[in-house]
Image: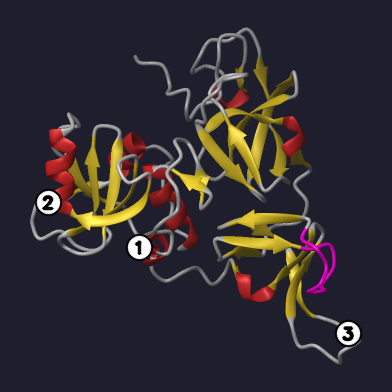
Amino acid sequence: MSPPDPRLNAWREDLAAEALRGIVDAPRYAAPRRARVVAPTAPMRSRPGAAGLAHELIFGALVDVYDEAGGEAWVQAAEDGYVGYVPAKTLAAPGPAATHRVAARLAPLHDAPELKTAPIAHLPFNARLSGEIVTEEGTAGGASNRRWLRCTDGCVPAPLVEPLDAPAPDGVAEAEALIGAPYVWGGATPLGLDCSALIQIARRAADLSCPRDSDHQQAACAPVQSRPLTRGDLAFWAGHVGVMTDAETLLHANAHHMAVAVEPLAGAVQRIEASGGGAPSAFGRLPDA
């Protein structure tokens, strides 16, 4: 039997999650400690001190912590199950359950609900916050009707957030809103993201589940064998994925454009094959539930 995928199972030679006892052999097993990301982003790496990004967690993400050493915490993300190492300083106690998400590419976090205060941080798309909507108090120039989300971490302009119980109606439209965002391997925010992160964060905005990596996304899909393709279908290559905006148009974060870009599927197929990337390996459709 093949060992569990370490990207989605917290196990290594010296330690494993208590839930894996009897599934993998390890000298020690650890119970999880829940924590929350309190930095705008938390870079996740596959091993301590690794140079490259494996994933990127964002403000408000919940994780289970299994070990901490040398300033790094070994964690499993609660949302997608991804396992890796993040800076321990980016984590804190979970706090109250999230009520809102950032619906803009970036949202300034202020320490008070006042427009002229300098932001203390900028939170990325889909960051989770817990708070209530308040109205800005009057200023020297008169009363204001600006609305803010006030939370324990600070205040965010209300037009830039949406309640979690009102998800985006169209995940593909959320991906389209990220056109032009730069391509960064392992990145998962509008400041830089890769092909599978684009699919994941767009679906997350619509409250739809999605694995982190393209091979897991393909495994979660129902195969699409017939044509024409429809909006929301995924096109897979070895190590790459994009989403169809219609029967003939592909949207994907890619290293050719170094950005999230739209192009005809036929042109992408021809270009990727000519560069040695091969033909599409599959087309699939993730469940909308």
For the residue pair 276 and 5, the one nearer the viewer reads as 276
Q: Secondary structure under badge 3?
A: loop
Q: Secondary structure under badge 2?
A: helix
* Tag nearer the camera, 2 or 1: 2
Residue 73, quarter of the rendered image: top right
Q: Is 188 rendered above or below residue 171?
A: above
Q: CA distance from mark 2 to mark 3?
A: 57 Å
Residues rendered magenta in the picture: 110-119
Q: Judge left or right: residue 217 versus residue 58.
A: left
**Mark closer to the chain start, 2 or 3:** 3
Residue under label 2, please give it: 266
**Badge 1 local density, few (<14 within 10 Å), some, or many (20+)?**
many
Q: Judge left or right: residue 285 versus residue 64.
A: left
Q: Residue furthest left?
A: 227
Q: Position of residue 81 (x, y in %)?
A: 52, 37
Residue 128, quarter of the rendered image: bottom right
Residue 211 part of the magenta segment: no
Most frequent secondary structure within the magenta stretch: loop
Question: Total of numbered circles in the picture?
Answer: 3
Query: Which amino acid, mark 1?
Result: Val
Q: CA distance from mark 1 to mark 3?
A: 41 Å
Q: CA distance from mark 2 to mark 1?
A: 19 Å
Query: Which amino acid, mark 2?
Result: Ala
Residue under label 1, please give it: 172
Say which residue appears at 50% left-offset and 41% top-offset.
187
Residue under label 3, please give it: 139
* Tag nearer the camera, 1 or 3: 3
Q: Quadrant of the N terminus?
A: top left
